[in-house]
């Protein structure tokens, strides 16, 4: 298994892969580009037929719904986005169903929300369902449930969703497809900009400026793809960032795109979401005793260790736990609201831990 994770030449032999494809690669002027979907399936289909288990994280539902609803571009209004998703999702899945049927492959649709990652019961259900589909030879088509999520509670982009799904299904590798052929040391086409073939450690990228600009129909950009690679590799999943046109070459073991080597330690997808992607709603400052206890791992945050609270926090919100200098020592899901936390700081006895150890994550070391 470790050889498969470390060597991109063996990507075509990886037993389980998550592939993410964005809206710009699947649509044209707001409509589904069936020829592009056909070309994608002509690569993924044979890979699945030779025994690779593949999960396809596919954008495109909102973009596919723009033309039927008369929108010229992705709407800014959340309700319009939801309407476009509801209309477009059926078009997208029908296209995938037709194209995979040419290879005798059945697909299954899975629409996820952040609750499906954060809530332990939801997480276990999603994990069991996706793994069962793979066991049955089905190709799951995963997307964020844009019809019901809001800007305040969403994954934000399918790049990060794909990284989380890779951990949920215990994938060997993650492939992030994009419009360019990899990560460059500067804007592609700019003087001196060179393709970065291999990233051994994410710290190597600190010398480069990576922008967040996405396409007109999508939500992601190169910065979100690099963050997704960080999430995946920090939990042991090798990641390839490559052009959609190079997917076949990648599965043939050719040296295309940018290959991010994984770290050896596996991290639960829920922890990755809390650590990297979830929206922090406030901060809780703790004393040195609580800082030491949390840093040792396995400890809950008790009310007695708090010294201050900031932000409008509701029970269940993600908060950043900081020391007296403002340095983050952990993150976790608060069991109480801001007014309740303030009462406990003032001396009222809390009925349970402020943040249970099961809902705490420590910074990546």
Image: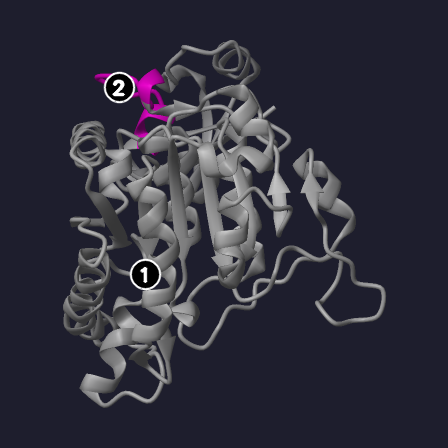
- Does residue 155 appear to the left or right of 255 in the view shown? left
Magenta stretch encompasses residue 281: no
Whether residue 168 is visible here, answered yes or no, is yes
Residue 352 in the image: state x and y as whole percent: 24, 16
Quarter holding residue 191: bottom right
Within 10 Å of disc 1 (Cα), the crowding (few <14, some 14-19, many 20+) is few
In the rendered image, the quadrant that contains the C terminus is top right
Q: In this view, does 95 lie above or below 307?
A: below
Q: Which of marks 2 and 1 is nearer the N terminus?
A: 1
**Residue receiving disc 1:** 151
- Does residue 182 appear to the left or right of 234 in the view shown? right
Label placed on residue 341? none
Residue 280 in the image: state x and y as whole percent: 42, 43
Q: What element carries label 2?
A: loop
Which residue: 23% across, 53% down? 103
Q: What element carries label 1?
A: loop
Which residue: 75% across, 53% down? 208
Residue 194 in the image: state x and y as whole percent: 78, 58
Looking at the rendering, the stretch of residues picked out in magenta corresponds to 341-358
Within 10 Å of disc 2 (Cα), the crowding (few <14, some 14-19, many 20+) is some
Magenta-drawn stretch, dominant element (helix, strand or loop): loop
Quarter holding residue 132: top left
């Amino acid at each position: 298994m470790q050889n498969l994770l470390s060597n991109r030449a063996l990507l075509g032999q990886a037993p389980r892969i998550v592939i993410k494809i964005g809206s710009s690669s699947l649509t044209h002027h707001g409509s589904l580009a069936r020829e592009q979907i056909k070309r994608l399936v002509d690569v993924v289909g044979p890979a699945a037929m030779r025994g690779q288990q593949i999960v396809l994280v596919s954008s495109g539902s909102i973009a596919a719904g723009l033309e039927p609803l008369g929108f010229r571009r992705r709407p800014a209004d959340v309700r319009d986005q939801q309407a476009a998703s509801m209309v477009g999702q059926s078009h997208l899945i029908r296209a995938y169903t037709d194209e995979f049927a040419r290879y005798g492959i059945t697909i299954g649709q899975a629409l996820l929300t952040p609750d499906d990652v954060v809530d332990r019961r939801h997480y276990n259900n999603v994990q069991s369902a996706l793994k069962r589909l793979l066991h049955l030879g089905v190709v799951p088509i995963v997307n964020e449930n844009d019809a019901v999520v809001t800007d305040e509670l969403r994954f934000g982009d399918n790049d990060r969703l794909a990284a989380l799904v890779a951990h949920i299904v215990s994938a060997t590798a993650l492939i992030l497809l994009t419009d360019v052929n990899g990560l460059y040391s500067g804007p592609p086409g700019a003087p001196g900009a060179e393709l970065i073939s291999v990233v051994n450690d994410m710290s190597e990228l600190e010398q480069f400026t990576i922008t967040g600009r996405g396409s007109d129909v999508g939500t992601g950009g190169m910065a979100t793809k690099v963050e997704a690679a960080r999430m995946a590799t920090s939990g042991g999943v090798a990641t390839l960032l490559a052009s959609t046109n190079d997917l076949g070459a990648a599965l043939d073991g050719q040296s295309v795109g940018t290959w991010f080597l994984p770290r050896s330690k596996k991290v639960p997808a829920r922890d990755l979401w809390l650590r990297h992607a979830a929206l922090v709603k406030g901060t809780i400052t703790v004393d040195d005793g609580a800082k030491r206890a949390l840093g040792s791992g396995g400890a809950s945050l008790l009310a007695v260790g708090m010294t201050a609270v900031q932000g409008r926090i509701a029970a269940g919100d993600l908060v950043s736990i900081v020391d007296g200098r403002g340095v983050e020592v952990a993150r976790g899901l608060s069991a109480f609201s801001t007014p309740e936390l303030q009462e406990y700081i003032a001396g009222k006895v809390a009925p349970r831990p402020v943040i249970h150890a099961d809902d705490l994550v420590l910074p990546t070391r």
